[in-house]
Image (spheres, coloured by chain):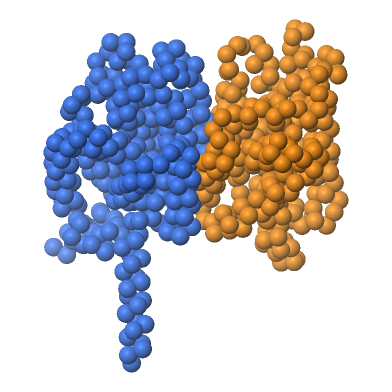
Chain colours: A orange, B blue
Amino acid sequence: LSDVVPAIGSGLVDGMIIAMVAVSFTLIYNATGVVNFTNGQLMVLGGYLSWWLQVDVGLPFIPTVVIAVGISAFVGFLIDRVVIGPLRDSSLLVQVTGLIALASVMDGVFRKVFGAESRNLPAYLSLRSVVPGLNWSATDLVIIGVTLVVIAALMVVLYRTPTGSYMRAAADNPLAAGLVGVNPNRVAYGTWALGAAMASLAGVLILPRLLLSSSIGLTLTLLSFAAVVLGGFGSLIGAIVGGLLIGVVQAVVARQFEGGWEPLVSLVLMMVVLTARPSGLFRAAT
Amino acid sequence: MAVWASVAARRRTVTAWERELPWVGAWRVNVLVVVAVVVGAFWGGSASSYAASVLVLSCAYYVAAVGYNVVAGVTGQLIFGQAGFMAISAYLLAVLEQAGVGEVPAAVLGVLASGAAALLIGLAVIRTRHFALALVTLAFAQATVLLIQHWPASHEDDGIFATLGGSNLVYIAVAVAAVTFILADRLVRSRLGRAMAMVSSDERAAAAMGVGSGLTRTVSATIGGLFAGVGGVLLASALQFITPQNFTIQLTILLLTIIVVGGLGSMWGTVAGTVLVVLIDQVLNVSTDSQDIIYGVLLFASLALLPRGLASLPGVIARLVALGRERTGQEAT
């Protein structure tokens, strides 16, 4: 059993990252009604930008994070303007298909620009364990700390500032929000920029724990979907809890069963929850 | 006579093609298909093995795309697991052949397994809607590929051989594609086909008319899965050697490109879409990463610029011509 505790520790760190991406997904879903199928690709974008800025350009870590996240925010803005814009009035099928097309294009571009081989970036801090028991390293502590700060900051923005109330208003009732002077376009591209920035930050942070390759985008997307499904669609708290849960269960399964079964965990959990309890684990079934 | 004419008119939904090109009636279509089959099969049989393999590959894509079009296009269900259903039949064919089962029983079992998987998915997700369905099917397809990668009998990532029909494969493939066309064309015009279209546009209205949306969606998913199974068997025998990498999301995106570019819900559109995609594939002869980009851009461009696909092109052109005539007419007066 003592083996399980470090697994839980490692799972919690992964779970933090998944939670951040799931929150980014929920943010975009709530404010614009669009199901973001490019989450994983945005994480991969963050990872590659960070790799490029640190290894090719030679920047230190902090400026790298700022620039990578900034570029990704602009990419998020572009996605809303260029890809979602023309499909805004189309059916859900068309919007989802459009985003899957975009994900495919992003995968292809990553492979063309950065090559097909996997990359492993040296850690930005030591990977040596500093917290005994849970086996957390300094890198892990940074991941946990940054995720908590970002999510807390997001909550403050959403519930304590005018910008946040615009976003919640647009999510709640787009028509009424428009009537009282909220610009739905600005909310849409603002939310996409914010969501893309968060997903890419998650990608930058998790990079040392993960082998980066151009083909993992879909796997990461499905991980964040699994978190959202577990927590219940549209719930920010649910997304966080779901992310942590997926991270822990996946790590424990990886510890107990040899041979790379852990990617199956999120897929099976997602299928079971969606068919048995479509409203998520924590909400009363309606 | 007038009564019969009106009954006949009510029985058949008139497609855009028929409005624009009245000579493409149902009987003439069947004759056309038969002629195309005979020509195609003889050409495929006499042509180089390369041309024959391209023809078989096109038929595989076409059959799977037709199934996809029935579910996603006609019934409007967000299913993104077509590659998973194809993987099931393709791998069953290959693995059963390795185990000494004959080609035909292996292929039939494979197709039935694909259909059964689709039926299960259909039953499981009766309660879920919209993108929940998209997520379940996407997860299912990913999980299928993962399981194949962990299944010793499939030789995991090393790949496995599959054969069907030997030198007669090209005839089988063309015949299957032709039967698929006729079946799908009949299906869309049938009572079931109209029920599917109704569920797609408004489930409540459909229910009010006595069309059970759950049953219709499940049947549609099963039909889509069966066609995917046939497509998977054809794909495996066209490639002759398959690995799990042949059945990733890229295959689903390729099929999606075919049906969207051709026109969602249009049976002729799927033919046009398949021809276009195979032409792009063969003419450009591009690497995998460029394929991701090209199909993605093509898919998006079609959604944004020609949302009803190539099938709507005759109508669009006719309208443009009419508009142009009106304009010049106004200038003349």
Q: Residue at 44% across / 25% down in the picture?
A: B244
Residue A51: tell me if it is visible. yes
Q: Nearer the viewer, residue B21 or A230?
A: B21
* Residue furthest out toward the top: A1
- Picture coordinates of residue B62 (x, y %)? 31, 40
With respect to residue B304, does B71 lie above or below?
above
- Residue A80 falls left or right of residue B145: right
- Residue B90 falls left or right of residue A220: left
Residue B193: tell me if it is visible. no
- Picture coordinates of residue A13 (x, y %)? 76, 26
Q: For residue A3, what is the image quadrant? A: top right
With respect to residue A48, does B116 lie above or below?
above
Q: Nearer the viewer, residue B322 or A260?
A: A260
With respect to residue B278, does B109 lie above or below?
above
Q: Quadrant of the C terminus of chain A?
A: top right
* Residue furthest out toward the bottom: B333
Q: For residue B309, what is the image quadrant? A: bottom left
Q: Residue at 29% across / 27% down in the picture?
A: B237
Q: How many marks?
A: 0
Q: Residue at 22% across / 35% down in the picture?
A: B52
Q: Residue at 52% across / 45% down in the picture?
A: A105
- Picture coordinates of residue B45 (x, y %)? 15, 35
- Picture coordinates of residue B213 (x, y %)? 44, 42
Q: Nearer the viewer, residue A176 or A213?
A: A213
- Residue B269 falls left or right of residue A115: left
- Residue A55 falls left or right of residue B276: right
Q: Quadrant of the N terminus of chain A?
A: top right
